[in-house]
Amino acid sequence: MTYRPNNLTMKVTQVAIRPTEQSNAAGRPALTPELLAASGARYSRNNEGLESILAKIDPNNLDKSVDGIFKMIDYGHQSIADMVPVALFIDGISMWLAYYLWAISPTAGGQESSTRYIAFDESALIDADTLGIPEPDRAAWHATMTEAFAATQSALEFWEAQFENDPSIARIPAELLADTSDKAKRQIARMRRNFGFDRARYFLPTACRTNVMMIMSARAWVQVCQQLLSHNLPESRHCGTQIRSELELSAPRMLRHAVKKEYFIQGLEREFAQLVRFVQEDNPVYLRGQLSETDHPATPFLETQTPSAVNGSALAADLEFHANRYAHFGTDIRRTLVRFGWDAVAFGEIRDLNRHRTGTKHCPLVPRGFYSAADQIPNDVDGTALGTLAETGRRASLACWERLQQAEPTAIYWTLLGTQFPFEHSTTADKFLYEAELRTGTGAHYRYAQHLHDALALWYERFPETRGRVLEGSAEPE
């Protein structure tokens, strides 16, 4: 299946939530997003109860009812806007912008089109004009992107050939391979597809078009608008304008806040200037050295801070009732602070690691190297063909570096999903362990699993008593 979007241009669509048939049958109230927030806010001003508040609603004039409930209360207050749920479907944005949306939306839930299930070809590339690629760079940029898509296809063919030669390379259970039922055939086909896509995707451009669905409060969307509209990339500003337009359907009273802000303009400019200064002051050999022959090793680090008098034995005891990754974590683990990360993570993994909602993530977008999945080539297989393809990714990553040296904001659009950047996450130990169990569990992407295995190894060095109680998986295919 090839990814061919119905609409090649960016489009943001607000989707309202309707009551279920069961809710209607039970006579439960159904409110617009702003009425829901207004009713919740009213709770803090009196103790009249929900039925009394609902009695003030005019079913023939819901918008006026919001003001009637609030009276002199300022609806623009951010705590009230937290009670306005808004779901937006965002079609046709770059994989980079999808990453950025998650980076500035730590409270969002949602999904993004997956490279595990979708084959992308050159029709998915966003045009240079939309991205703001400077005219002098456009021919070279498009040639690089064309080469990247060709490399993706060649890499997919390489990995499919490895699978045909030896299906066990995909770790598919022997009993499943021996099963001739239609169900087993479908499962094997899915595993085969995932195996190939997971290893070939590193050559896909971050300028590929993707789709994102996110749901969060109007307050959070307003802050997203403020940052997007204040950004130095035209794609971001265009997305902010569309989000603002759709937000009006759910929370029109918040629009006066959904504008560019001078403090965001200044802050984003300062952060970009810091990246530029780094590449201008450092020797480009820093990058070329990492791009010479092999993929960057992605060295992990982990720092912890436990509460006073808490040791490894106490943390192990906190895992006594931890039967699955959603199960109970004890108090001391929930109070332990963790900062972990890697000095070089492929952007393909960053897209998902970045979506974990707790804590703070940090990812300075200065290339550290290029990951091509060369570590997955069996010892008895000639990897020359893949090594040649890897040069495409290394040149693209270096092109990003060079344009950062020139303070060109669109530098990020030269990168591929295999381009590696530093990435770190600060959170609490229960959230770290949940992420480690998720990313090493059944069906986990092989590269996520390796990153989290490495991080867990550092955790065990510090707290060996917890080994065996953390539900570390082996990323069995599903």
Image (cartoon, grey):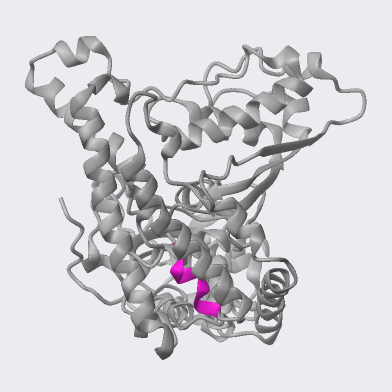
Question: Residue 299 at what x, y percent from top left?
Answer: 65, 39
Residue 464 higher or lower than 390, as above or below: above
Q: Is residue 86 left or right of residue 271?
A: left
With respect to residue 367, does 12 lie above or below?
A: below
Residue name at image x 70 percent, y 66 percent: 283
Residue 280 in the image, given as x and y percentages of width and height: 70, 74
Query: Residue farthest to the bottom?
Result: 135
Quarter of the image for residue 432 reads top right
The answer to whether residue 379 is above or below residue 202 is: above
Quarter containing the C terminus: top left
Work out whether residue 108 can be spotted: yes
Q: Residue at x 14, y 28 (%)?
A: 186
321 or 287, nearer to the observer: 287
Q: Nearer the viewer, residue 45 or 459?
A: 459
- Which percent across, then down, holds residue 206? 41, 63
307 lies left or right of 228: right
Q: Nearer the viewer, residue 375 or 438?
A: 375
Q: Does 299 appear in magenta?
A: no
Q: Give the magenta-colored segment's residue range.
A: 409-415
Q: Main secondary structure of the magenta part?
A: helix
Residue 441 or residue 273, whichever sits in front: 273
The residue lying at 47 percent from left, 78 percent from top is 240
Horizontal side of residue 471 vs 159, given as left or right: right
Q: Is residue 411 magenta?
A: yes
Residue 369 in percent (x, y) is at 55, 53
Report whether residue 317 is seen: no
The number of numbered badges drawn on the structure is: 0
Q: Is residue 73 above or below residue 183?
A: below
Q: In the visual, does 28 lie left or right of 354?
A: left
